[in-house]
């Protein structure tokens, strides 16, 4: 990859020579000045046939840990050593990243409106063109996310574990927790699943920061995936321990506003009735103790001490 960037209207893998490494900028919409908003795309195409794997990051603009995962995969993968095609999109939500916010610049969550609309508002058209101009060529997708603002996450997977191949992709990421979660069709992995693709979501820690350890874990998962798909020679690196596998998960919310402290740490096991959070008023008086609704594992939690009524407390995974 020589560093040059080609501007193209859509990704057509048939035009890329075997053994080539390419960087593209693909315009999806125009801003208010009439200037194009480009999505960065990297492609490594092997000399031999094989599947097409895409690794995407920053569908939410403040979820940054996935960006260096994509960058480092492409620094370490040589096209002559792979079979099939590897696609990387280090930033899907370019306007959101530039505004340092989760949502698109019109206030929509891109991961709730997939596959968008050919004729719709700005985010609808951005999502539609992302799918039709870039991601319609993939066979497999690993979509990298993090927690949202004011929260932290474990290193965990969302995947439809009833699908054997999706389940295997999930286990290859060496995550701490796996949640069996058939995705809504309006998410990126959910939509691609309706198109016969295999897709998982990997939650790589916390928002608005780079976490080196989790980035390394994410990189290991991608290389495991490349080995499993026979896109690269190499051994799958087994996890140090078995992940917690959850049948489902949900958030508990506070029914009192005030200053919040959530006590358990991520990946900690909690028991039904255990105190998981306390809420105090402005005078420091204890006004509420929240208890776990049932036994489970802490997938994520709120770290924002200021919590109005209805704020998130703790993301609880229910073990199978």
Image (cartoon, rainbow, N blue to C red):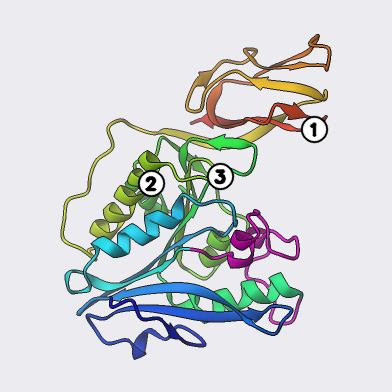
Looking at the rendering, the stretch of residues picked out in magenta corresponds to 91-120
Magenta stretch secondary structure, dominant: loop
Residue at (80, 32) in percent of width and height: 310
Q: Residue 215, which numbered label? A: 2
Is residue 12 or residue 35 the one in the foreground? 35
Q: Nearer the viewer, mark 1 or mark 2?
A: 2
**Contact, mark 1 vs mark 2 (Cβ under 8 Å):** no
Q: Residues within 10 Å of mark 2 (few under 14, many from 20)?
A: many
Residue 93 colored in magenta in the image: yes
Label 3 environment density (alpha carbons within 10 Å; few <14, some 14–19, many ≥20): many
**Percent coordinates x, y for residue 36 in the rendering:** 61, 82
Give the label on residue 310, or none.
1
Q: Secondary structure at mark 2?
A: helix
Q: Disc 3 designates what residue?
A: 207
Disc 2 + disc 3, Cβ < 8 Å? no
Q: Quadrant of the N terminus?
A: bottom left
Of 192 and 276, which appears nearest the observer?
Answer: 276
Tell me which label, 1 or 2, sits earlier in the chain.
Answer: 2
């Amino acid at each position: 990859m020589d560093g040059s960037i080609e501007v193209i209207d859509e990704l057509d893998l048939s035009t890329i020579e075997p053994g080539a490494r390419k960087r593209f900028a693909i315009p999806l919409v125009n801003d208010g000045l009439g200037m194009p908003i480009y999505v960065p795309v990297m492609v490594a195409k092997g000399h031999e046939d094989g599947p097409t794997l895409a690794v995407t990051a920053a569908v939410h603009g403040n979820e940054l840990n996935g960006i260096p995962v994509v960058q480092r995969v492409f620094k370490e993968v040589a096209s002559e050593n792979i079979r099939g095609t590897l696609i990387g999109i280090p930033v899907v939500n370019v306007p959101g990243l530039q505004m340092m916010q989760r949502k698109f610049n019109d206030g929509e969550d891109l991961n709730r409106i997939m596959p968008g609309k050919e004729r719709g508002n700005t985010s609808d058209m951005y999502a539609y063109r992302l799918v039709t101009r870039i991601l319609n060529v993939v066979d497999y997708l690993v979509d990298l996310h993090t927690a949202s603002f004011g929260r932290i996450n474990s290193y965990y997977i969302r995947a439809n574990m009833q699908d054997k191949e999706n389940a295997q992709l999930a286990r290859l990421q060496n995550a701490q927790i796996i949640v069996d979660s058939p995705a809504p069709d309006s998410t990126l992995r959910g939509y691609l699943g309706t198109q016969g693709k295999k897709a998982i979501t990997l939650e790589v820690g916390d928002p608005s920061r780079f976490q080196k350890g989790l980035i390394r874990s994410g990189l290991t998962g991608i290389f495991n995936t490349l080995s499993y798909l026979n896109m690269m020679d190499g051994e799958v690196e087994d996890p140090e321990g078995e992940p917690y596998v959850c049948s489902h998960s949900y958030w508990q919310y506070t029914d009192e506003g005030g200053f919040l402290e959530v006590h358990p740490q991520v990946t900690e096991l909690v028991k039904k009735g255990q105190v998981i959070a306390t809420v105090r008023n402005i005078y420091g008086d204890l006004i509420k103790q929240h208890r776990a609704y049932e036994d489970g594992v802490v997938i994520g939690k709120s770290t924002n001490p200021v919590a109005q009524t209805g704020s998130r407390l703790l993301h609880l995974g229910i073990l199978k």
